[in-house]
Image (cartoon, grey):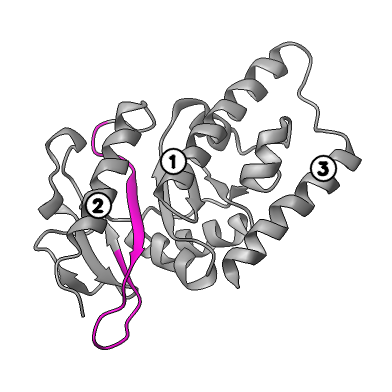
């Protein structure tokens, strides 16, 4: 077993601070995690941001390592209140190495409206896996919320949390952040397009071809 996981904890810290710098969260909202090496009991582990500490004053020691039952392994703080959501995704998606939960303005506005983000630009299909579905509302930090978001996520890399925000996942922290940025961009485009008469999806033949590329990549990560 490798103690401390300093490199991984530092990577989570840097990703969380980058998320904040990009304006994807406000205050202490949102959270970030990544898979880390198993411990001596062969438990699956994740490094995750703590609850209630503003991003600009976070340091590496504030990032916690827990198992998928949210039992602490390293660190003394309280893990993010949405740790259960992160664990639920890791359990069901072997291709996912990092999870990011953001509260960006346009994605949250679409989530509040209860709308899916349509596959309106090519990057959405190739990076996210098509449309971004909105999960049914459930109380924050609850098991029901974790289940609802995991179901809305399916095999894609993003889902909206109704009346809450957005979740982006990826093979690593860089990809999860890219997904959250792209979803915010697509949400903004969809909102603006609706003011001009409505947003339209990409042609079906394009969607099919680009989804094949996305699925091929995801299958390679699962294997």
How far separated are the C-alphas under marks 1 and 2?
Answer: 15 Å
In the picture of the structure, the residue carrying the numbered disc 3 is 207
Look at the image and give the residue range highlighted in magenta: 27-46
- Is residue 120 left or right of 20 when viewed as pictured? right
Of pointers 3 and 2, the one earlier in the residue sequence: 2
| Residue 26 place in picture, x, y as percent | 30, 30
Task: Provide residue 175's location: percent of width, then percent of height.
Answer: 48, 46
Q: According to the image, label 1 marks what residue?
A: 177
Give left or right: position of 80 versus 23. Answer: left
Looking at the picture, tell me which residue is in the foreground, 7 or 23: 7
- Numbered disc 3: secondary structure: helix
Task: Tell me the number on the disc at residue 25.
Answer: none
* Dot 1 or dot 2, earlier in sequence: 2
Q: Residue furthest bottom?
A: 41
- The residue at 55%/33% (across/down) is 182
Q: Residues within 10 Å of mark 3 (few under 14, many from 20)?
A: many
Looking at the rendering, in which quadrant would you find the C terminus?
Answer: bottom right
Q: Report the Cα–Cα distance between label 3 and label 1.
A: 23 Å
Inspect the magenta stretch and tell me whether residue 32 lies in it.
yes
- Cβ atoms at labels 3 and 1 below 8 Å apart: no
- Compute the Cα span from label 3 to label 2: 35 Å
């Amino acid at each position: 077993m490798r103690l401390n996981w300093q490199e991984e904890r530092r990577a989570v810290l840097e990703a969380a601070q980058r998320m904040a710098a990009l304006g994807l969260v406000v205050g202490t909202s949102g959270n970030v995690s990544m898979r880390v090496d198993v411990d001596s009991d062969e438990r699956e582990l994740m490094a995750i941001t703590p609850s209630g500490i503003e991003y600009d004053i976070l340091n590496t020691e504030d990032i916690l390592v827990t198992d998928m039952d949210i039992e602490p392994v390293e660190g003394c703080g309280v893990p993010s209140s949405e740790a259960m959501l992160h664990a639920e995704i890791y359990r069901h998606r072997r291709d996912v190495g990092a999870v990011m939960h953001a509260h960006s303005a346009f994605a949250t506005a679409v989530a509040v409206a209860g709308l899916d983000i349509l596959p309106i630009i090519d990057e959405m299909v190739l990076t996210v896996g098509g449309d971004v579905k909105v999960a049914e509302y459930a109380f924050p930090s609850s098991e029901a919320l974790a289940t609802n978001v995991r179901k809305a996520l399916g095999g894609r890399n993003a889902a909206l949390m109704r009346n809450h925000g957005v979740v982006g996942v990826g093979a690593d922290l860089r990809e999860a952040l890219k997904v959250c940025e792209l979803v915010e961009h697509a949400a903004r485009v969809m909102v603006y397009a609706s003011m001009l008469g409505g947003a339209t999806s990409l042609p079906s033949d394009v969607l099919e071809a680009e989804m094949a590329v996305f699925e091929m990549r995801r299958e390679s990560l699962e294997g």
